[in-house]
Amino acid sequence: MTVFKEFLKIKRSSVLLFALLMVILCVTAYLYSLTAEAVIYTAVLWAVAVTAVFTAEFLKFRKKSIQLDKIKRNLPAMREYMPEPSDAVEKSYNEIALSLLEEKNRVEAREAAKLKDLNDYYTMWVHQIKTPISAMNLLLQQKPDGEMSEQLMKIEQYVEMALTYVRCGDDASDFVIKNTSLDCVIKSSVRKFAKSFVRKKIKLNYTETGLKVLTDEKWLSFVIEQLLSNSLKYTKEGAISIYSESGRKLIIEDTGIGIAAEDLPRVCEKGYTGYNGRQEKKSTGIGLFLSKKVMDMLGHKMVIESEAGKGTRVTIIFSNPHIKYE
């Protein structure tokens, strides 16, 4: 019915012309006193002829509409579905459309190649920068320096963020989904920040979860480390608590400065630092953005609750609605 309505819109001038001709026929018959039979016979012949022409044109229009719908659903196959032009104007439109498609494909191919080169460069840079970082770690083991070790750990974090940023843009991310001990991931992440806990005199309240979750250990570690880093960054005194709740939830809670109510809905946006981030001048606006993106990719859910001056509570809900594993 929609196609027929569109057809009538296009042919409305022809419909009006036919109606006008019928009026002219009636007026002519009245003026010249033509018999009713002659007028009806003529009108029927006209109606049959017009109906036949309209039917043929409607079928042609419907066929083209179906072909155009296929094109809209599958633009790369435009050339295959393009309807045959019925006149020179349609032929010109077809040629323009195909030229635009070819140009679009060329631009997309160029941009994809540029993006791949950029991703390859950043990946190579991250792996190369890890070599001097490892060397510095070895030197610091021989001659310990707490402050320098902490700053080096921050550099490692930023390097890992850069690598994660590149990998998150790749649809073929290297997920290894398996049943993973959540406590092993937490303990490994906490060990990295042990010196920071001691230096800042922040208490750690950790209750083992006893959970095994379907996830990627490396990517989950990245998220937990980001959350711990944020908690340590914005907690000047008090404690950071890690525990499970309701069976499938991991809670990371701190007694830090919290997040302003107006900033809370946007903290996971790319580059958004919020009031606290601007005041403290420590936020990049990337950590929570990447954490949220990783959680979405893994099929988990991350919920952030906070109140300015009273701390922040992050809940990771382990659910995997779209992930399959062997």
Image (cartoon, rainbow, N blue to C red):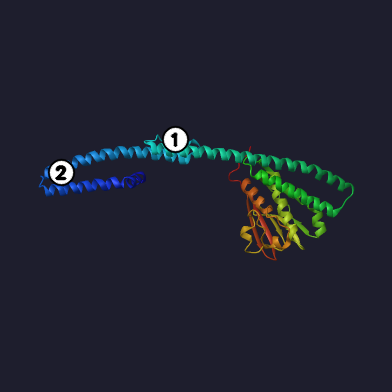
Q: Name the residue at 80% across, 55% down.
A: 196
The answer, for residue 215, to whether it is visible in the render is: no
First in residue order: circle 1 vs circle 2:
2
User: Compared with residue 193, is residue 90 higher up or lower down, i.e. above or below?
Assistant: above
In-front residue for pair 317/85: 85
User: Compared with residue 128, is residue 199 higher up or lower down, i.e. above or below?
Assistant: below
Mark on residue 40? 2
User: Compared with residue 225, is residue 311 higher up or lower down, i.e. above or below?
Assistant: below
Mark on residue 129? none
Q: Secondary structure at mark 1?
A: helix
Q: Secondary structure at mark 2?
A: helix
Give the x, y percent position of residue 189. Answer: 75, 49
Q: Which residue is mark 1?
A: 81
Kind of residue at disc 2: Ile
Kind of residue at disc 1: Tyr
Query: Mark 2, residues whose alpha carbon is within 10 Å: few (<14), some, or many (≥20)?
Result: few
On the image, which quarter does residue 146 sit in?
A: bottom right
- Left or right: 269 with respect to 102? right
On the image, which quarter does residue 310 sit in?
A: bottom right
On the image, which quarter does residue 279 sit in?
A: bottom right
